[in-house]
Image (tube, rainbow, N blue to C red):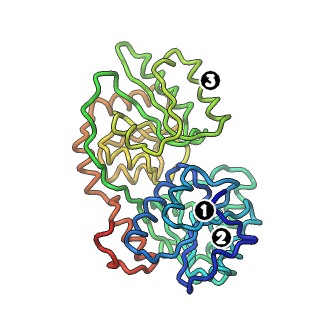
Amino acid sequence: MHGRSDTRGDRSVASSGGSTIVYTLGSLHIGGTELRSLELIAALKRRHSGLSLILYISCRDGGPLEPAFRDLGIPIVQGRRGLVGMVDLWRLCRRSRAAILHTNADTVSGFYCFAAALGGVKVRIAHYRNSAPPSASLYQRLILHSGRLLLKLSATRVVGVCEGARALAGVRPEKWLTFYNGIPDAAAAPPPPSPGPPALLFLGRIHPEKGYAKTVDIFEALLARPGTEAALHFVGAGSAAETAKLRRRIGASPFASAITVHGSSREPHEHLRRARVLLLPSAREGLPGAVLEALSQGVSVVASDLPGVREIESVSIGVHCIARDAPAADWADAVEEALAQARPDDIRSRFREGPFGFADYVRGFERLWALPADEEAGGQ
């Protein structure tokens, strides 16, 4: 991949005087963590022109966000997947003489921090983005528990996108910092409601844990009610296999003509601006960025009753939490309620008063990484 190095042979990431930050991501696909990271790093580069940051990824290819990171002047280093990748990270840390590791790896964060400790990195930050592990398999349980042990031994700071994520990390409150994601202010007010049926939006990966099939079930339960009209839009990337499953499920629906699959989008705001309700029947989340984005645009949300969603609900209006395994009819009831009670201006206003401001988010990272907060006060 152009602009990306292999840690096993590359020497273009030589020491920059011990002030380098190694920031890890799983991939550069369009996802919540990746988009939040891109927004954050862009803002920090504007405020700190000399910021030395290396992006370490652990996937076979980069992803559609690679050019955007490269345009910021960020070196991208590719490590191998699995435990052998820890050797690659160790080599990178030693070669760059990194001062800080900031890893976004959830259950394997402890492994990353351990490799960085062996590589001489003094500050090792584990950033938890989810409140539950990816599965309950034996392998994942082994990773979870061994990762927690290594986390306690080698992380100097553990932060998470919501208080609910602390259970996944398994750390004591005194070692934990809840660090809410920040969302840039909406650029403009949403357009007036279109004359067509209200638009429901699924915004996220086309993946089973995001509940795309459940979304179609909910939509069918809603439209089966006499006199109900609506349209459903899917926006998000997915594997060819999962996207094909979604299209087959839609093809079998009596309401297929009212459902549109848009694929991946670098401009989710454009879809949110036209939506009336965001649907999020996920099996697991951290602090779902799609929910924050929706509320910032004044869009009501109907979402699974998960820890991070409840934390957003506690300081917002327009959020309707439903048990993920509740019948589709119950979800449809919540959608009807959300449509009837929607107050976009109030939703946007309350959201702006909440703890999800982008400026506070950037300043929080400046404190976390001990960056000078006043280098370019007007650059954000």
SS of the residue under disc 2 = helix
Location of residue 183 in the rendering, given as x and y in whole percent from the top left corner: 37, 55
Residue at point 59%, 18% (across, down): 252
Which amino acid type is shown beneath numbered disc 3? Arg
Location of residue 72 in the rendering, given as x and y in whole percent from the top left corner: 48, 64
Count the labels in the image. 3
Residue carrying label 1: 105
SS of the residue under disc 1 = loop
Mark sitting on residue 112 = 2
Residue carrying label 3: 248
User: Is residue 231 shown to the viewer in this render?
Assistant: yes
Task: Work out whether mark 1 precedes mark 2 in sequence or the reverse, and give the earlier one.
Answer: 1
Task: Work out whether mark 3 precedes mark 2 in sequence or the reverse, and give the earlier one.
Answer: 2
Location of residue 335 in the rendering, given as x and y in whole percent from the top left corner: 38, 30
User: Is residue 170 shown to the viewer in this render?
Assistant: no
Residue 257 to residue 315: above or below: above
